[in-house]
Amino acid sequence: GPSLSSLHKQLVQEDHFHGDLIQKSFLDSFHNLTLKLILQFHWMHDRCAHAHYFMTADDDIFVHMPNLVKYLQEKKG
C-alpha cells in the first residue's frame, strides 16, 4: 500500500485544490468529538458563513440524500 508520506502528500494536494480538509494534531477518539466539532464550526465560520445548513459525518455514517433534502425542504417551507 501507499506510504504515510505519500498519503500525506495526497492530503496536502487535496486541501490545496479544494480547501476542504481540517488537519490538527490530536487523537481522533470518542473523547475528542467535541474538539473535532469545534474545529469544524471554526472552519465553517471562516469559509461558509453564508451557508444555511452545515452537516458533519464520519466515515461510518450513511446519509440518504433524498430523505435529507426532503427533510430540509419541509423545515424551510
Image (cartoon, rainbow, N blue to C red):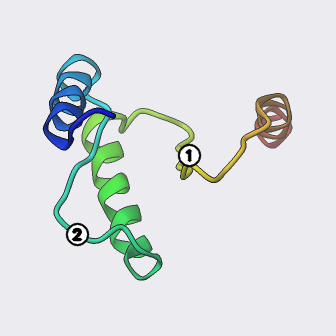
SS under mark 2: loop
Front of the two marks 1 and 2? 2
Most extreme residue toward the front, as rendered?
Answer: 1
Neighbourhood count class around disc 2 (C-alpha, 10 Å): few under 14, some 14–19, many 20 upward: few
Neighbourhood count class around disc 1 (C-alpha, 10 Å): few under 14, some 14–19, many 20 upward: few
Could you tell me which residue is drawn at 23 percent across and 28 percent down?
15
**Relative to 45, does residue 34 appear above or below in the rendering?**
below
Q: Nearer the viewer, residue 15 or 51?
A: 15
Could you tell me which residue is drawn at 79 percent across and 36 percent down?
64
Q: Is residue 54 left or right of residue 35?
A: right
Could you tell me which residue is drawn at 18 percent across and 37 percent down?
8
Amino acid beneath label 2: Phe
Comes first in the chain, label 1 or label 2? 2
Horizontal and vertical percent position of residue 53: 57, 40
* Residue bearing mark 2: 26
Horizontal and vertical percent position of residue 72: 76, 38
Horizontal and vertical percent position of residue 44: 35, 44
Q: Nearer the viewer, residue 8 or 38?
A: 8
User: Looking at the figure, which quarter contains the C terminus?
Assistant: top right
Quarter occupied by residue 49: top left
Quarter occupied by residue 1: top left
- Residue 55, labelled with which disc? 1
Horizontal and vertical percent position of residue 51: 47, 34
Amino acid beneath label 1: Met
Answer whether labels 1 and 2 touch (C-beta < 8 Å): no
Alpha carbons under labels 1 and 2: distance apart: 22 Å
**Relative to 9, does residue 3 appear above or below in the rendering?**
below
SS under mark 1: loop
